[in-house]
Amino acid sequence: SLLPGGGGGRRSERDLAEAALLASLADETPEGRSIVTLARKKYGLQELILPADGKCIAFSPDTRLSGVDIHGRQYRKGAADSAVSFVKGLGARTIPSGLADVADRVARAGSTPLVVSCDKEIFGVVNLKDIIKGGIKERFQQLRDMGIKTVMITGDNPLTAAAIAAEARVDSFLAQATPEDKLRLIRENQE
């Protein structure tokens, strides 16, 4: 779902969908493809092709942002704090007042809040809901019965990770994990 303005902005849901679509042009992840599908189906927006002069900004665990630079504009989507830092770095003077509350509410519900921006302006929040696979809770219980501990390692923020971990009933979790953090935790648990 889309939450325009992050809590009181002047952008419409369609504006947010269009910016999210543009920020997802080069994103081949399931999350990026689901944003493109939503924008196409719900708003009739056409999937575009990154033009030759466009630049893909791949997601990285360090920036926690991805997007494109196209036609002199910078479209980004990512973690709330990263998106705020990005637009402030471009000279943004104001951030939507309810942005942090919206992102926290989305995360506490077990979804991933992706803040979408274009240049210095935050357009709103995309609410990506992770679907817990059927039977996973029972499988984790079977593992616990065998003495095996379940650990979820995710790049998601701590609020989203906590909600998903509780829903899936994992024993513990690590949030905002970098690839190095993931490898370290796997090695520690294997020992």
Image (cartoon, grey):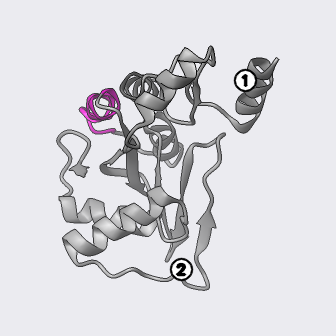
Q: How many marks?
A: 2
**Residue 187: within the magenta?**
no
Q: Position of residue 172 (x, y in %)?
A: 54, 17
Q: Residue at x 51, y 49 (%)?
A: 90
Mark 1 and mark 2 lie on one chain; the one further toward the N terminus is 2
95 or 153, which lies in front? 153
In this view, 9 is above or below 72: above
Residue 126 point in image, percent of width and height:
32, 50
Would residue 110 be found to the left or right of residue 67 on screen? left
| Left or right side of 124 for 156 | right
Q: Which residue is mark 2?
A: 50
For residue 72, side relative to residue 110 (left or right): right
Magenta stretch prevailing secondary structure: helix
User: Which residue shows up at 21% across the image and 56% down it?
Assistant: 11
Q: What residue is pinned by disc 1?
A: 185
Amino acid tagged 1: Leu
Q: Quadrant of residue 48?
A: bottom left
Give coordinates of residue 81: x percent, y percent. Answer: 47, 34
* Label at residue 129: none
Boundaries of the magenta span: 95-108
